[in-house]
Image (cartoon, rainbow, N blue to C red):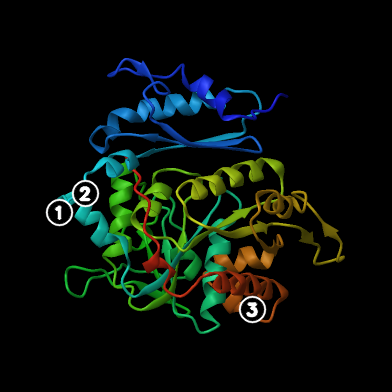
Amino acid sequence: MAQVTSEQQILDALKAVRDPERDNDVVSLGIISGIIVKDGNVGFSIEVDPNHAERMEPVRKACENAVHALPGVLSVTVVLTAERETQAAPAAPAAPAAPAAQAKQDTRAALPGIDAVIAVASGKGGVGKSTVAINLALGMAVTGLKVGILDADIYGPSMPRMLGIGGRAVSGDGKKLEPMEAYGVKAMSMGFLVDEETPMIWRGPMVQGALEQMLHDVNWGPLDVLVVDMPPGTGDAHLAIAQRVPLAGAVIVSTPQDIALLDARKGLNMFRKVDVPVLGIIENMSYFMCPHCGERSEIFSHGGARDTAAKLGVPFLGEVPLDMEIRETSDGGRPIVVSNPGSPHAKVFRDIAAQIAARIAPGASERRAPPRIVVQ
C-alpha cells in the first residue's frame, strides 16, 4: 500500500473540503497549520475564530475524513485552535484588562497546591488502563509522595470500585467538594456523585463542565502528583483536560497487539499535538504465566509497545503481565500494590511509578502554560 509521505498530499486532499459560510476550501483560506505525518499517523490544526468554533465542527470532521481516506493513513487527529486570533491581538503599552473569558481561562489554569498533573491514557478501551492508573498512583504513594487520582471517565467511572470506596462526596463549605480517600490516596470520580448504574447521557460541553468542577472545585490539598485516569479514545474529555490543566506529561497504556498499538499511537500523537510531553508507554497484558505449569504464553503477542516506543522516540516504561491476581485485587477494591506489596507484579508497578516520578520535575504543572484549544 502506498504511504502518505508529504504535507502536499495532505493539502491536496483538504482542498476538497469547503467552509460553506465563506464559500472556499480550507487550504485556500489558510486555516490549516502544523501538519505532522509520521508512520501513517497524521495530525494538524484548523485555526478558527473562537466565536465560530461550533459551526466549524462539521468542517473539522470533514477534514479528518478526507485525510483518513488517503492510502496508508492509519489515524488522523484534527483539533480546532484559536491561536491565530491570539497572535493578531494588538499589543498596547497600557493594555486594558483581558476579556472575561480569557481571564477565566488564565485564573483556572493552575491547580493550587498540586506540583504535577499526569494523564494516564489509551487509544482504546479494554487495555486495562484504569487498573494500571490506580496501581501507579498507589506505587507513587507508598514511596511517601502525596498522591491524588481523578477518574475522568464520566461515562464509565471505575475508581470507586477499584479503591473499595462507597458513599457520596460531600462539601464542607458548600463551595468545594472533599475528595474521598483510600490507602493514603485522595480520589474524585463521577461515581462518588451519582449511582453506579445511572447512565450519563451528556454532550461534550457537559462533560467538560463536570471535569472542570472535579479538577478545580475539589479540596485536593497539597499533592505532589495528581494522576488523571483518562477515558479511552481521544475525545472531548482529553481536549478538556489538555485545555484546562497544564499537564506535566502523559503515560500511554497499550496491549501488545497491532490493533491496540494503532490506537495507542493516535492517543500519543494527540498529546504531542497539544504540546503535552509523553512520559512513556506501558505494555499491559504483556504475557501470561501459567500458575500451574509455569509456562509463559504471549496471548496478545509481545514487545509491540517497546517497538512502538523506540520508533516514536519515547521511553518504554515496562511490561505488566496478564494475571488473575491483578484483575481480582482491582475488582475487589484492594489493588495489588497494597494488597500484596511483596509480589513480583506489585514490584513491576512500583518500578514504573518510580520512573514516572523521576520524569516529573517539581512544580512542572505551574510552569507549563496550557494550550489554547477551542472545543465545542
Q: Name the quadrant of the C terminus.
A: top left
Which amino acid type is marked by label 1?
Answer: Ala
Whether the residues at callouts 2 and 1 have beta carbons within 8 Å, the answer is yes
How far across and how far down the image is residue 325, in percent?
A: 67, 68
Which amino acid type is marked by label 2?
Answer: Ala
Crowd tier of the residue under label 3, counting other residues whose Cα lies within 10 Å: few below 14, some 14–19, many 20 or above:
some
Measure the alpha-carbon separation of dots 3 and 2: 59 Å
The number of callouts visible is 3
Rendered view: 39 above or below 183:
above
Measure the alpha-carbon separation of dots 2 and 1: 7 Å
Mark 1 lies on a secondary structure that is loop
Numbered tag placed on residue 340 in the rendering: 3
**348 or 278: which is nearer to us?**
278
Q: Residue at x 26, y 60 (%)?
A: 108
Whether the residues at callouts 3 and 2 have beta carbons within 8 Å, the answer is no
Rendered view: 315 above or below 205:
below
Mark 3 lies on a secondary structure that is loop
Which residue is under mark 1? 95
Q: Residue at x 43, y 60 (%)?
A: 247
Label 1 vs 3, first from the N-terminus: 1
Q: Residue at x 34, y 42 (%)?
A: 83
Q: Which label lies toward us, 3 or 2?
A: 2
